[in-house]
Amino acid sequence: MAIVAHVDHGKTTLVDALLWESGAFRENQVVAERVLDTMDLEREKGITILAKNTAVRYGGTKINIVDTPGHADFGGEVERGLTMVDGVLLLVDASEGPLPQTRFVLRKALDAHLPMILVVNKVDRPDARIDAVVNEVYELLLDLDADESQIEFPIVYCNAKAGRSSLEAALLKARQRFANLTMRSLDSNDPTLPGLLESARREKEDTERTLAEQAREGPTAEIPKDVGIRDVQLALPEKSAVVAFSRYEHTSNPALPSRPSYIAFVIGPDEASIRAVPIGPAKTLEDLVNAWGVQARGSHLTQASAAADQSYREVADRLRRRIWDPIAPALAGVSRVFIVPDGAINFVTFAALPASGGKYLLETGPVFHYLTAERDLVRPPQTTANKGLLAIGGAAFDDAPVARGSAAPLRSVCAPAGSLQFADLPGTRDEILDVARIWRGTGDMATLLSGKQATKRATIGALSKRRVVHLATHGFFLDANCRPTAPSAMLTRAVGGLVPASARARTTETSPLVLSGLALAGANNAAKRPAADDGILTAEEVASLDISGTEWVVLSACDTGLGEVAVGEGVVGLRRAFHIAGAHTVIMSLWSVEDQSARAWMRELYRARFSQHLTTSDAMRTAALRVLAARRASGESSHPFYWAGFVAVGDWR
């Protein structure tokens, strides 16, 4: 197999990656980059002058590889190499596309009737044009009079320098195409879309299946898989406990029908401190959670402040008596509680439940932190080498600059027939500037993307290897009854209500990861843009990324904690997607957050974490306490809508 390409498209780097992947080098072996560039002039200029050969083993097959020059001055070496091989890898840069030497080497390969595999390299480049580049290769083949058999070829997508699996890159592209077509199908009568959508689904599922068969260890591999209760207990910090909720089928007699119920398991530091606390029938609790959620999301804030606060307290007090009071006696002396939610409890902010004397559990109770599972506590201490802040806000959803002073009444995607339209959020640009000013005190770098620069392609290209990612934009979770969840007079980051999966109108059985996501630059024209840069970053696309080592992903948009509830598995949406991608902690909202309160809360959060160096759980509590205190001091409403919308899930440190 000969690797052919234009100069500097990454041939020799690809060979390095193939050699490492095939086990040609020891894990601790020091190997120079571009190992096949052995001539001094080659290493000095960074180009291949003479063709070289090597070999790798795949399964039981030995594959001989010829690395050919990419510079036009050494075309003779390419022609000589092509006489020795059975096929070619045509390597093309994902941004630059086919160039003059690409045309030369491809013509020679076609003349020799060599089968071809197209390799699109450097797919991580912010300016990558993956779909366009593939189309340009097809056009080049037609221009070179390729026959029908030569136009059919496999395509591999990769980042050779990072050694990233081509299947991972192919999966990202497949998921982007599927998500783009899904969004277009929500409000289109185009008869060709169902067929395209089904084809995209098959492509995505085939790639997912192949990748799963390789049993790739993902970012969660750092947590041991055989974690037991004793491991969790040993990992508990001082004066802390786990409260793990479970929704289960309760029955006292196997001959009688079961009844969905909730139970809480309290896990302290020793065996004697493990207790099971029944919570009661699922319907009773879920009705209370739904009623509380309506109040917490600010549905009564059009009333006078005192009346709205009282209305909230009456409903929240009933929920607290059901969900917290039975557990509290088992937590005597505990100052930090790790909540592992299940079912409807995923949407409860415990710190916002009322306490005596007009206070909240935020002020009188322990520090609350959320885990996806008990085993999250066993995660080794963070030793990430990731650097810098990536902050995205003020995106130009219409591909036009965001006008200062113009403001969206809602951060909302609610629209008839499922069409996605997002109003400008100029305040989010101010928010990322606030965050960047505080971040500057860490001495680390900060990258800000705003306006027309806040594209999906630029975001994906900038996400990896960041210590903190801050996304201030519209979030969405699509359902059939998209309703505003706060008064329209307020400036909120809103996306509408959550409804049960059975109520959602879907033309196809679509993953909830496709129906939740974030809006970026150009999102209002998504149907007219390529899938790789359509302005809609779905949770499914996020799950395909690698952000291993990222300490925080802050989703400063509304309802980013929502999604479809899978009992026993948590919430399938953005929070799940960012954890799959490798984030240690995801900070997100459970309701539509009032714009200026969200900005103030974020300032306090970053100060507590990066100026005072508090743990994540302590920084979350401190931010809420400061916003609450400031509102009381100025005579404003202390309603939790303004300060309790955000929760953190994952590593508490």
Image (cartoon, helix red, strand yellow):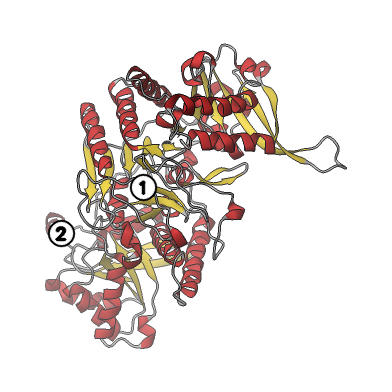
Res. 224 in view: no
Q: Secondary structure at mark 1?
A: loop
Height in image: 318 above or below 282? above
Q: Position of residue 548 (x, y in %)?
A: 39, 42
Which numbered marker is on residue 42?
2
Looking at the rendering, in which quadrant would you find the C terminus?
top left
Looking at the rendering, in which quadrant would you find the N terminus?
bottom left
Height in image: 432 above or below 126? above
Q: Residue furthest right?
A: 255
Q: CA distance from mark 1 to mark 2?
A: 49 Å
Image-quadrant location for residue 374: top right
Amino acid carrying label 2: it is Glu
Res. 308 in view: yes
Image-quadrant location for residue 142: bottom left
- Residue at x-position 51% and y-position 63%: 205
Residue 287 lies left or right of residue 470; in this view the side is right
Height in image: 355 above or below 549? above
- Residue at x-position 34% and y-position 53%: 422
Label 2 near label 1: C-beta < 8 Å? no
Amino acid carrying label 1: it is His
Mark 1 or mark 2: name the one nearer the start of the chain: 2
Which numbered marker is on residue 474?
1
Image-quadrant location for residue 636: top left
